[in-house]
Amino acid sequence: MSSNTEKNNLLPVSDPPKSDDKLFKGSAMTKRGAYAAISYMSCAVLLVMFNKAALSSYNFPSANVITLFQMLSSSSFLYVMRRLKLISFTVAEASVTTLDNPVTLLPLKTLIHTLPVAFTYLMYMLVTMESVRGVNVPMYTTLRRTTVVFTMLVEYILARQKYTSPIVGSVGLIVFGAFVAGARDLSFDAYSYGVVFLANISTAIYLATIARIGKSSGLNSFGLMWCNGIICAPILVFWTYVKGDLEITFNFPYLLSPGFLAVLFFSCVLAFFLNYSIFLNTTLNSALTQTICGNLKDIFTIGLGWMIFGGLPFDLLNVIGQLLGFLGSGLYAYYKLVGK
């Protein structure tokens, strides 16, 4: 856009300028990176609650359809904001005034470049949505905490990323705490647990792909979200139609219920902001930091899940495991801030 005033109206979507202040002297994280991390954690806690309400409290039969609604909603929001020139899809803000393609709003070669991100996003969304169904919220968050190990492995395989001993030690404490917390879970279900671990793997691959391909695509967070939507939505529509999920949805008895519609609406809105904050946090910080943020927000998820949905009786071993996990996450955050 031509004027400085118009440029300032653009929402934050890309890496900050080099002059951006650190969180504090010696910190490895910028203030903007910290805001992105906090925004992600807030959206993630609320989204788990609304997804759990739709799938469990209302017994909505298809997690894939909710994912489709969220994807279509996000694409609609992005399209409107781009047309209103509130956002750009590329790092170069000046390109917001031009539409490279009247349909895709981006060059075809850019879409092709982001295909790995889109496909790993689709896998991440579908598996993660299904994983929340069969496991109570406290145990779900406990098992999801082991994602950090998968993330470290994927980052090492893709980019030969190595970490210091303090970082590895804090991650080890997180995983140990997760196993301690789940040692006496009486609601163990092999299939449900397997789906959660599959979600951990898909999350790690997705975040590492963002960090590796997202930065080289020339797109900002909104641009990557847009590519994900226009690539994955047609695939998901076809998939839900073939599986019969769309027909089941039309026959769902609470489909027009005000309560269910409210839950679905907030789920879609939160999914949009969650995806935005994931891209922003991963590009400003790292895939591993994004995963650790997922662990830090678990204390709020577990507390709300316990109060709203129940499903896990008080157990001293579980509490000890949870505290160990939070301690590990806190140590990682400390080491990240002091640059170790």
Image (cartoon, rainbow, N blue to C red):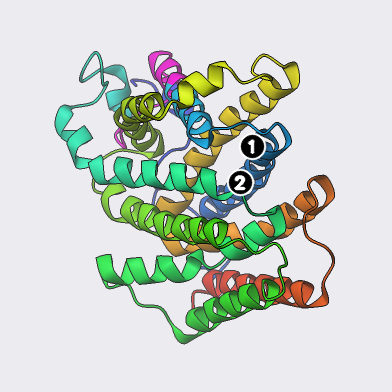
Residue at which label 1 appears: 55
Give, as a three-letter code, the residue at label 1. Answer: Leu
Residue at the left extreme of this rendering: 109
Badge number at residue 267: none
Residues tagged 2 and 1 counted as in contact (Cβ below 8 A): yes
| Mark 1 Cα-neighbour bin, 10 Å: few <14, some 14–19, many ≥20 | some
Look at the image and give the residue range highlighted in magenta.
76-92
Residue at the bottom extreme of this rendering: 165
Judge left or right: residue 274 versus residue 220.
right
Badge number at residue 133: 2
Q: Is residue 51 magenta?
A: no
* Residue at the image point whose x is 36% and y is 57% from the top: 205
* Residue at the image point whose x is 30% and y is 33% from the top: 90
Q: Earlier in the sequence, mark 2 or mark 1?
A: 1
Residue 216 vs 272, above or below: the answer is below
Image location of residue 18, percent across then percent down = 39, 53
Residue 289 visible, this angle = yes
Q: What kind of element bears circle 1?
A: helix
Give, as a three-letter code, the residue at label 2. Answer: Arg
Q: Quadrant of the N terminus?
A: top left
Residue 164 vs 307, above or below: the answer is below
